[in-house]
């Protein structure tokens, strides 16, 4: 990288990738919130849309090495990089897929929380993952944490707390219809729980990428494939669990109702369009 030669790491490529990642991530949250505007209360099915977007990266990866020359070059570069970095080339697909167990839980919590708190609040609270990731990295990876890191995390936590308090106070004083203050607090707690789970996912992925030479796009695609499998099981389980509030679930009274959810998805074109935006935004987000 340019930084190794004394130059800036903020190259045009890095700036463009960062811009695309932020844009795709924002569109992802907005698309989920617009789905909720159709009274679509199916958090697990919505999370499945996210994993479909991740799985598309595996297809793109396969297309990129479809030619024999491209495939040979790819594996030659992988072997060279593995030898240089002292990494193994043999990473089990199950090891890669286990990361989606974290993702399926964390993303389901975040997406369901959008039914209870505004998208802007959700997006700001998600920044708290930095603090959780730093904590778990220090514990499990023995990562060195410097003073400027701690200062940044302290500012992040302060902002996290202020946003949470403002949201609770705002919901308590608001005269418009919407989730009660208690449910808003539940939504915030769901985001906090999801951040801890996703921090665990990031640390686990870092361990894999440190030990194994794995193309990131392939890893994301395999996580998407396993994520769909995990979400199928979560959906079946939560289809039999009573929902405590109509603000969180479909009118039938269970946490998930896949039949009703799929019928609604394919009967309302606006909802289907925003679901496609979700899939595409997730695909682009994980490309950068």
Image: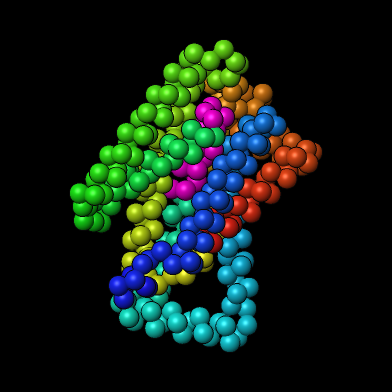
Q: Which residue is found at the position 44% from the left and 21% from the top?
A: 168
Q: Magenta stretch containing residue 116, yes or no? A: yes
Name the dominant secondary structure of the magenta segment: helix
Residues 240 and 124: in front is 124
Q: Which residue is found at the position 49% from the left and 67% from the top?
A: 13
- Left or right of 287 in this view: 85: left
Residues 123 and 282: in front is 123
The N terminus is located in which quarter?
bottom left
Residue 161 spot, x, y in % from top left: 35, 30
Q: Residue furthest front?
A: 7
Colour scheme in the image? rainbow
Q: Which residue is found at the position 35% from the left and 46% from the top?
A: 130
Instruction: Confirm whether residue 30 shows in the render.
Output: yes
Residue 150 spot, x, y in % from top left: 24, 45
- Residues in magenta, as a range: 102-118
- Left or right of 269 in this view: 85: left
Residue 45 spot, x, y in % from top left: 62, 41
Q: Which residue is found at the position 39% from the left and 24% from the top?
A: 165
């Amino acid at each position: 990288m340019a930084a190794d030669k004394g130059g800036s790491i903020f190259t045009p490529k890095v700036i463009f990738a960062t811009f695309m990642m932020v844009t795709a991530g924002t569109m992802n949250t907005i698309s989920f919130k617009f789905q909720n505007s159709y009274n679509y209360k199916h958090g697990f099915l919505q999370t499945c849309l996210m994993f479909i977007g991740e799985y598309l990266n595996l297809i793109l990866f396969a297309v990129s090495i479809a030619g024999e020359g491209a495939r040979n070059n790819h594996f030659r570069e992988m072997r060279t990089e593995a030898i240089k970095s002292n990494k193994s080339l043999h990473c089990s697909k199950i090891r890669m897929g286990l990361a989606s167990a974290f993702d399926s839980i964390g993303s389901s919590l975040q997406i369901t929380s959008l039914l209870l708190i505004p998208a802007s609040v959700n997006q700001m609270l998600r920044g708290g993952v930095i603090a959780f990731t730093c904590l778990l990295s220090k514990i499990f990876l023995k990562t060195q944490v410097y003073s400027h890191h701690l200062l940044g995390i302290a500012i992040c936590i302060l902002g996290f707390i202020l946003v949470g308090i403002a949201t609770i106070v705002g919901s308590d004083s608001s005269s418009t219809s919407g989730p009660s203050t208690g449910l808003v607090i539940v939504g915030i707690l769901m985001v906090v729980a999801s951040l801890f789970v996703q921090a665990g996912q990031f640390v686990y992925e870092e361990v894999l990428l440190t030990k194994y030479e794995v193309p990131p796009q392939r890893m994301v695609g395999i996580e998407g494939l396993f994520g769909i499998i995990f979400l199928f099981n979560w959906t079946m389980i939560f289809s039999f669990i009573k929902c405590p509030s109509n603000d969180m679930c479909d009118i039938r009274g269970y946490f998930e109702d896949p039949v009703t959810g799929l019928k609604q998805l394919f009967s309302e074109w606006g909802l289907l369009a925003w679901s496609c935006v979700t899939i595409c935004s997730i695909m682009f987000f994980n490309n950068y």
